[in-house]
Amino acid sequence: MKRLNTLTATSALCLAAGFGSAAIAETAQADVLTTYADIAEATYGDSLIAAQRLQAAVDALIATPSAESLETAKAAWLAARVPYQQSEVFRFGNAIVDDWEGKVNAWPLDEGLIDYVDMSYGGPTDENAFAALNVVASSELTLSGATVDATDITPALLSDTLHEADGVEANVATGYHAIEFLLWGQDLNGHAAGAGNRPWTDYAQGDACTNDNCDRRGDYLKAATDLLVSDLEWMAAQWAEGGAARAEVMADEAAGITAMLTGMGSLSYGEQAGERMRLGLMLNDPEEEHDCFSDNTHNSHYYDGLGVQNVYLGEYVRIDGTLISGPSLSDLVAEADVALDTEMKTKLSGTMMALGRIKSAAEAGFSYDMMLDRDSTAGEALVMGGVNGLIDQTRSIERVVATLGVDSIAFEGSDSLDDPDAVFQ
């Protein structure tokens, strides 16, 4: 269903001239790649720090359940999304990230795999026999004909046995969105205002427990959170000095610059403009929100866009306020074509303004799922403002590819942009 939007125009011709071969170039490609790797290391490092704070809040919720401790855990989850979403630009061009990402940020998910759901949710389907498995309520599971002992809900059970069980991508058992569901519960408001409303008593002890299996629910939440922390520890290490991701980027300068541009273009076009924004608007489906349980999608979109800008400008502001910066793609482009650099920065700024309008409206009470309502002209205008900005900046990224003489790049596509009729087939 996803297609590749392959850039070929003039790229191969430019490659023949040799990427960055001009002796007068002031900005070294190696320095640009060092900045890129430094920003990746800082972004994943911040994601780890924020996840560790979430881990502490989850431990406190499980130890002393209350309305206050649940709200604290929710706030920690929301804060954890800020640095992580800025890291998504490192996907696509870096196989080590893209192969790993599904463990931490896969969506959408069939939440009935994990815990109880509303009757309207339904049961198993032809597409997913485990859509209502309810691991929290089941100490023994049958998966693809095999009996699985789920007495102890552990990180290994979630990652090795349940995640994408039976080869179904919607069986998301790990990562941010599994944790989000366990903190908020289902959002049953449709296009109306309101996020999920899981009661704190779902983690209460003894007779105060609601919806049964509170201990196992806490075990699942802890296992998923601990796994998220360990996964982020691993990825942060890959970008540190001596790490595999940093080494791969630095090993081949032309390939490294290609990875940077691939991440920018694929996230801008097929992933964010298409799969995360245009598709949900076409379907008018609040279930297509990226952070659908918490109603945090406006922030996810905003920080995804900021991640793209970070990579181009060679700048990232850490969660402690420290600025990471250095030689950038912008510097390389300005040396080759100052007008194109100005154009690229203008497009990025315009996209951030459009995503900022979505964020501001949502924070004022006009939530993203309300924007997806078929009858909301204002919502459609806001979302399409972001979509159009992302598409427009992708066209400038194409011109950057050609100007820098990078080989042809296959950006991720989306039927919602490339073949809209296929969405409804």
Image (tube, grey):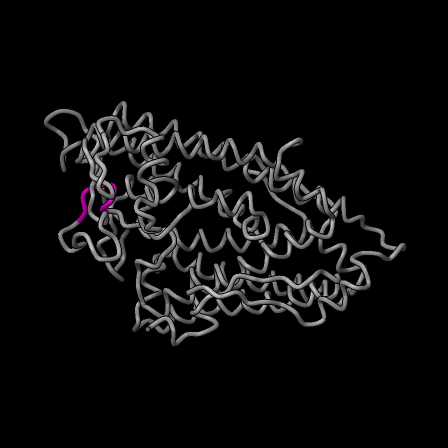
For the view shown, which residue lies furthest in the left direction?
207
Q: Residue at x 17, y 35 (%)?
A: 138
Task: Give the extent of the magenta segment.
Answer: 112-117
Q: Residue at x 59, y 67 (%)?
A: 6
137 or 361, which is in the foreground?
137
Residue 88, given in percent of the width and then of the height, sits at: 52, 49
Relative to 106, does residue 278 appear above or below in the rendering? below
313 or 102, which is in the foreground?
102
Quadrant, the N terminus = bottom left
The quarter of the picture where residue 351 lies is: bottom right
Relative to 219, does residue 166 appear above or below in the rendering? below
Residue 188, given in percent of the width and then of the height, sits at: 22, 54
Q: Indicate left or right for 45 with 197 as reference.
A: right
Residue 102, given in percent of the width and then of the height, sits at: 43, 46
Residue 305 visible somewhere in the drawing: yes
Q: Indicate left or right for 94 with 20 as reference.
A: left
Relative to 420, does residue 202 appear above or below in the rendering? above
Quadrant, the C terminus = bottom left
423 or 268, which is in the foreground?
423
The quarter of the picture where residue 158 lies is: top left
Magenta-span inclusion, residue 115: yes
For the view shown, which residue lies furthest in the right direction?
24
For the view shown, which residue lies furthest in the front direction?
145
Residue 295 visible somewhere in the drawing: no
Magenta-colored segment: predominant secondary structure: loop
Q: Indicate left or right for 164 with 331 as reference.
A: left
Magenta-span inclusion, residue 411: no
Q: Indicate left or right for 293 with 324 as reference.
A: left
Q: Residue at x 65, y 69 (%)?
A: 8
